[in-house]
Image (tube, grey):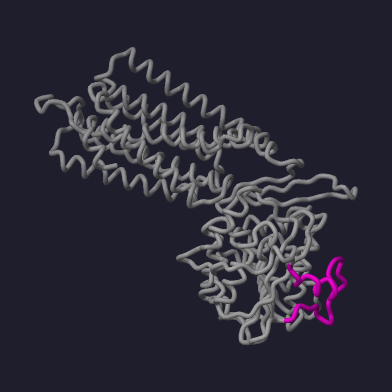
Amino acid sequence: MSTTALRGCDTAAPTRPPAVRHTRGARFLLLLAVFLCAACGLVYELALTALGSYLIGNSVLQTSVVISVMVFAMGLGSLAAKPLRRRAVGAFAVVEGVLALVGGLSVLVLYAAFAWLQLYTPAMIVITLIVGLLIGAEIPLLMTLLQRIRRQEAGSAVADMFAVDYIGALVGGLCFPLLLLPTFGQLRGALVVGAVNAVAGVLVVLFIFRRQTRRFVQVGLLSGATAVLAVLGTAYVLADDLEVTARQQMYQDPIVHAETTPYQDIVVTRSTAFTGGDDTRLFLNGDLQFSSVDEYRYHESLVHPALSGRHGEVLILGGGDGLALREVLRYDDVRQVTLVELDPAMTDLARDFEPLRRLNDGAFADPRVQVVNADAFNWLRTARQRYDAVIIDFPDPDTAALAKLYSVEFYTLLGQVLTPQSQVMVQSGSPFFAPKTFWSIAASVEAAGYTTTEFQVDVPSFGNWGFVLATRGGTAPPPLRLSPDVPRLRYLDDSVLGAATVFPVDRRREDVRPSTLMEPTVLEYVLDEWKNY
């Protein structure tokens, strides 16, 4: 970016006098505009990568495409700005006005393209190219304007410009996850940034150079900036309705709750099931997590075999919906349950939103429950308490952030909170739809020093689904059984568990690699196997 931009930083002839008076104040205002524009530019980039990760998954690919296309376009934009330096004030104002409009509306347009047109990736590339071209044109034009205020040696001017530019990028990068997403959400956050961009790029520059800009040019640019702000403001007012309409387009059943958190997109739908009762469904980033019609099959299989031994102290990693927690609390001799869930919005929803609270039987109100909102990997690094049983209920590892929770290193860390008799249950995806993923998870658990028993059950909403039961310190696979004091179950009994360990010929163990932090093979497998579903 820097080399290409500098080619466009030639300024007017050395004999031209400064174009403005009070150069110190004007220079400060222009550098402030540089700061704000840099912050806005990075927010656009982050918004595009975050949206792609939410809607498409594969965050590594989405981030790589956005960054590479944008940097390429920025180089082209820097070259394209060279002829514009003669009219730098008007050109910069126009560039920033268009950038504010395109960048501010980018998330809304891409969301609509995904929901209605199924053209997300082409639309994302086009918008990224346009935004990158406009951002690339900023530095050459700003350098020209800076030299008009006060001429200085080229190296010093470049240092000042890029120092402010990079600081602005830092602030924009921090504001996106810490301020914009929690306060405004993705759609409105981008619109707010677009408005800031319009003010910084158009109004500030016109204020600095108003005496050197013709009256009709000022009127035209101010009218354009007003129009941009009006469009962004209208979109801001209508954002909720637009988001609800677009989001509903992606789900078959009526949406009863939706929110975007710094970690994920949470959607709850509700309809009438074929049984005549309610069918409440939870989706995270578009992926189904459970249906109330048959979730008991999944959660009974996940929890009760792991509690067949000692279960006074139980650890649940993930499971923020509280349904696994509900099953654990059915045992009277459970003394304490620690639930570690990254997203506090998920546990708050499960605690307070009536449809979920009713499904989990108000589990979070039980005094035996301790909720920790933290990244499970980092939490394990400092955890010291020992647990009799561990339930691992993470979403499928279809992102790099989730893949680390299915790594050899993660299961090795887990060992420090286990006793020699502890049992661990890992939800492991579908042996039918994603057999390599399933057996890679089992291989990763074994590579961390565990012995395992793999089994599968039928959950109609998911299809065929698999689990890995694991123990450390033994040589024989852990027996798949239920506790003598198991509460009455709707799906599982010993005969069902006995049959669950038998895999058909076409889905038996494959020669797959375990997954590690440096080689997340489980991510490779899951993206390849689920791409056609």
Q: Position of residue 180 (x, y in %)?
A: 50, 45
| Residue at 48% from the left image edge and 26% from the top image edge | 229
| Residue at 56% from the left image edge and 29% from the top image edge | 235
Q: Is residue 178 left or right of residue 15?
A: right
| Residue at 67% from the left image edge and 66% from the top image edge | 427
Q: Position of residue 384 (x, y in %)?
A: 56, 80
Q: Position of residue 439 (x, y in %)?
A: 62, 67
Rendered image quadrant of residue 224: top left
Q: Is residue 462 above or below residue 92?
A: below
Q: 422 or 352: which is nearer to us?
A: 422
Quadrant of the frame with the N terminus: top left
Q: Is residue 35 above or below residue 505?
A: above
Outermost right residue: 276
Q: Is residue 76 visible?
A: yes
Q: Is residue 149 above or below residue 364?
A: above
Q: Is residue 512 magenta?
A: no
| Residue at 26% from the left image edge and 43% from the top image edge | 162
Q: How many marks?
A: 0
Outermost front residue: 505
Q: Position of residue 438 (x, y in %)?
A: 64, 64
Magenta-colored segment: predominant secondary structure: loop
Q: Is residue 221 left or right of residue 377?
A: left
Q: Is residue 365 visible?
A: no
Q: Is residue 491 magenta?
A: yes
> Start and end of the magenta stretch?
479-503
Q: Is residue 59 above or below residue 97?
A: below
Outermost left residue: 15
Rendered image quadrant of residue 326: bottom right
Q: 64 or 444: which is nearer to us?
A: 444
